[in-house]
Amino acid sequence: MWSCVRDIKWALRFHIHISHFTHSIAAMSPSQLLVIFALLALNTRLVFGQTTIDCQRPPQLVDPALCCKDGGRDQVAEQCAQRILGAANGQKAGGPPSLDTAACLAECILTSSKYLDEPQKLNLANIRSDLSAKFSNDTLYVETMTMAYSKCEPQSQRRLAMIMQQQQQAQQQKPQQQQPRCSPFSAIVLGCTYMEYFKNCPDHRWTPNAQCALAKAYVTQCGLGA
């Protein structure tokens, strides 16, 4: 469980400190929200800015959205951020969301978007339909994102099973420990999906420079995404 928490904290630090992250979290772009959710999908630590990728060393901070253009601002994500973060108990003002809050935020986004068929199963038909309606002029983006969701679903289910097993063991050792408000499944899915999209970013959305090439190398070589 500790390794998961360690990587979660790293993932938050990775994206929370990007240069343009100075506005309200409720106004984040999908990529900014999704990289926060990647904190529940990460299982290795990675590095930017070197010719040799070392997954065990702290990364040089970089904003993935500057390398691979995302879908832009999303009304559902913003509404969920306002609803969930506005009601987050014990949340430090202006600080990154807690793991439980991030899980509830991700669950709100997928539920409100009708992307969940069951608590731990995606509705890929709805996902494709929604993305096609929003990005009717960019079928390659729709295909890339839909494929990312599809590839990430089974891996997210496996990761959730591991987390639930760890939580059960922790609960046995500390029966009074507070239970999470929301399942981490949606956060794991969103984090995995964005990383998978980043690895397979369409050429017309990709920024070809050395830093972005290293970013893709680290995501690919260090096992992020599906």
Image (cartoon, rainbow, N blue to C red):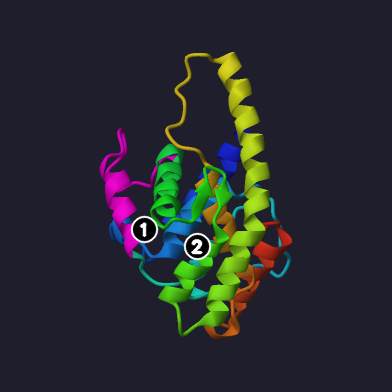
Query: 73 above or below 192?
Result: below
Classify the position of the N terminus by image quarter.
Answer: top right
Confirm whether the magenta stretch covers residue 78: yes
Query: Which of 213 and 24 lies nearest the eye of the viewer?
Result: 24
Q: For residue 165, which quarter of the picture?
A: top right
Q: Residue at x 64, y 45 (%)?
A: 157
Q: Position of residue 118 (x, y in %)?
A: 53, 45
Q: Secondary structure at mark 2?
A: helix
**Three-letter amino acid code at the position of disc 2:** Asn
Residue 154: x percent and y percent? Answer: 67, 51
Q: Secondary structure at mark 1?
A: helix
The image shows residue 86 at horizontal and vertical percentages of 26, 44
Asked whether, in this view, residue 216 is left or right of residue 12, the answer is right
Residue for badge 1? 77
- Left or right position of 26 against 187: left
Can residue 18 be seen by looking at this rendering?
Answer: no
8 vs 61, nearest the viewer:
8
Q: Nearer the viewer, mark 1 or mark 2?
A: 2
Magenta part of the chain = 75-98
The residue under the point 32% across, 45% down is 84
Residue occupying image coordinates x 58% and y 48%: 121
Q: Report the side of 174 relative to 153 (left or right).
A: left
- Image coordinates for residue 80, horizontal then vertical, percent: 33, 52
Q: Which mark is residue 53?
A: none
Q: Residues within 10 Å of mark 2 (few under 14, many from 20)?
A: some
The answer to which of 10 and 177 lies nearer the viewer is 177
* Residue corresponding to mark 2: 126
Q: Is residue 1 magenta?
A: no
Tag 1: amino acid:
Ala
